[in-house]
Image: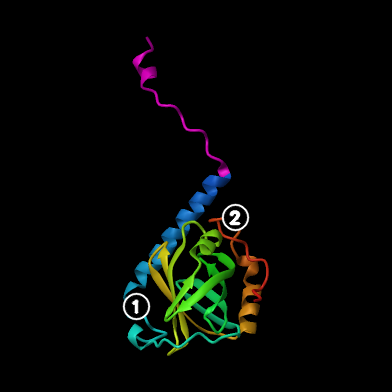
Amino acid sequence: ALPISQERAAPRDHARDPQELTMASSTKNMLVIFAALVAVTTAQEQGDVKAKGVPDEECGNDPFPANTVQCYTTTRLRTTVSGKVLLDSDGVGIVNFTVSGLIAADCREVPVVQQGQIMNVDQTALAACLPSFVSIGSVTYCSATDDVGVAFQKPLPLTFHLTPVDCELLDKTTETTTAAATTTPEGPGEGRRLSKPIHL
């Protein structure tokens, strides 16, 4: 019979790849920083949930401007969220969506359909281009104030209210932040490297 010490010995895990450990540590640190920023701004943000817009019942249900590219952006908690939207007269189209700062992602030509205030964005397409620790619950359009609300579910439940911006200016801003964008390997659920300004 084997000695008791050997019988109870658990098999050792294989050594993890150093790059995998570094990425896991980086992601954990980023989430900690993000959570800390939210904690210190909770009071302010609670009073600013609809800072760029109006109550939902007053948002209006007018259709999104058709057949012309519309650009929106905002920055909160050291994170910039931007989008370029193109819809036809039936409210069907695509959106190019970028996130930079504490979180980095680049989503191109994501299908979207407008139904009232709701912008139904293709969740499968989003999942393929967003980091695995990020998810978007809903996207809304407030025609009364012409702002777009992007509600994140992960890593924390936060809503970013995007306001109109000149598309040419947005392209230039995207280009200047390209070098500082994510270096996470490209692939489903792992984020994508920003490679050039967005052009619909």
Quarter of the figure with the C terminus: bottom right
Corner quadrant of residue 96 = bottom right
Residue furthest toward the top?
Answer: 1
Which residue matches tag 2? 187
Corner quadrant of residue 182 = bottom right
Q: Is 37 left or right of 92, judged from the image as shown? A: left
Q: Which residues are magenta?
A: 1-18
What is the secondary structure assignment of the residue under circle 1? helix
Residue furthest toward the front?
Answer: 90
Q: Residue at x 62, y 74 (%)?
A: 174
Residue 114 locus on image (x, y percent): 48, 78
Residue furthest toward the right?
Answer: 196
**Magenta span: chief secondary structure:** loop
Residue 197 sits inside the magenta stretch? no
Q: Residue at x 52, y 80 (%)?
A: 91
Q: Residue at x 36, y 78 (%)?
A: 49
Residue 10 sits inside the magenta stretch? yes
Residue toward you, 46 or 64: 64
Residue 132, above or below 72: above
Residue type at the position of mark 1: Gln
What is the secondary structure assignment of the residue under circle 2? loop
Which residue matches tag 1? 44
